[in-house]
Image (tube, rainbow, N blue to C red):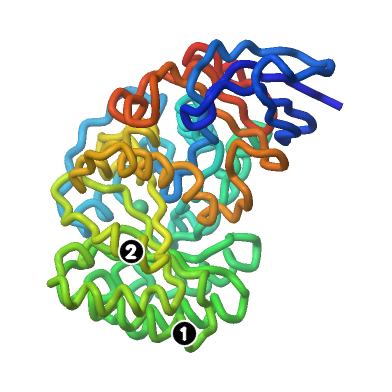
Amino acid sequence: MTSLILTNVRPWGADPVDVAIADGLIADVVPTGTADGAGERVDGRGLLALPGFVNAHAHVDKSWWGQPWVSYDGEATTQGRIAHERAERDKHGIPSTASTIAVLREFLRHGTTATRTHVDIDLGVGLRGIETVREAAAALDGAVEVEIVAFPQDGVMRRPGVLELLDQAAAVGATSIGGIDPASIDRDPVAQLDGLFEIAERRGVGIDIHLHDGGELGAFQYELIIDRTLRAGLQGKVTISHGFALGELPAQRQAELLVQFADAGISWATVAPVRSAPLPWRAMRDCGIPIGLGTDGIRDLWSPYGDGDMLRIALGFARLHGLRTDDDLAYAIKLATTDGARFVHRAGLDLVPGARADIVLLDAENLPDALMRAPRRQAVIAGGRLVVRDGELLI
Ligand SMILES: [Zn+2]
């Protein structure tokens, strides 16, 4: 039995404890100085301890991380970015196992131990991206748990054959299938959504749909999604990613939709981009609409931004929404950790006995201090294994 005892750490900033780890799980949490038993001991030096971060919306297959800088030169619209990526990706070897490993390692270095990633499937790469991501995750021995959404980045109905690819992806283990702007990309919202829901219902997978469309065009598609979620009995299995329209709608319209989202068990993934309309996050929380945070793509042919640090995404969420109180700032961190668990189908993600031993140590006074400074990760334990020390990867 492999075992590790992490001494003198402060879970969520509380009083110091020792954490006993066995077989990849947290076996016990006891007041510091009282853990006994054999095994390697790691001195936590009174550092703040958090559960591993969850990246609920990533694109680990499409980055040029680890390669020389790629200057962005596409048109800055959704369609412009799609076209730019199609034209340029082969030149940069996208998708490749090496680049995907580089991204996952960077996630891990910042303390992310689980991610939901959208993986491009299209008429050019077929399902090759899914294989690539699986190989990369296996190369890290599961240190980062990876859940796959088969993502039709280039459209569905406008690209005959893509629906069949989504169906095949669902058959070979994608946990969810994606979609993208059924109105503005496919210009046939009913057809795309009917196609996606038919597959999801038949294959028993979830749906996680990219929706950039704003205002009432976005809201119209929310209504189509709510209606189909209820009819297909997919409550709890549908996520809207980005969903920029929600923050833009009048308060009364928002309130009506939130009740319907809650009723349909629809969750929300956001990367809290600057200049997007703030989400009605407090009302969403009160209605029980789950929110997950993600990095989106980092350093890819869409955008040069992003470093894979979920704590910085939580800080972006806090800034966008003007959070100031300690409780609200702590909530932003929770979104990037425990609240993300459902997006990767993890139960009991926390610093408690029985949970997978995913632990991040930071030199911070408390949660708000950790959020404001996003200090380097002093240590990361993933599945019971010490994988980062002093901000550097050991694997
Ligand atoms: Zn995305």
Residue at the spot 37% in from the left edge and 33% down from the top edge: 311
Residue at the spot 72% in from the left edge and 19% down from the top edge: 5
Residue 264 found in image quarter: bottom left
Residue at the spot 25% in from the left edge and 54% down from the top edge: 83
Q: Position of residue 16 (x, y in %)?
A: 57, 21
Residue 171 found in image quarter: bottom right
Q: Which amino acid, mark 2?
A: Met
Image quadrant in which the C terminus is located: top right
Mark 2 or mark 1: whose residue is earlier in sequence: 1
Q: Is residue 76 above or below residue 249?
A: above
Q: Which residue is mark 1?
A: 230
Residue 222 found in image quarter: bottom left
Q: Position of residue 334 (x, y in %)?
A: 43, 43
Q: Which amino acid, mark 1?
A: Leu
Q: Which residue is mark 2?
A: 284
Mark 2 crowdedness (10 Å alpha carbons): few <14, some 14-19, many ≥20: many
Number of callouts: 2
Q: Position of residue 279 (x, y in %)?
A: 24, 58
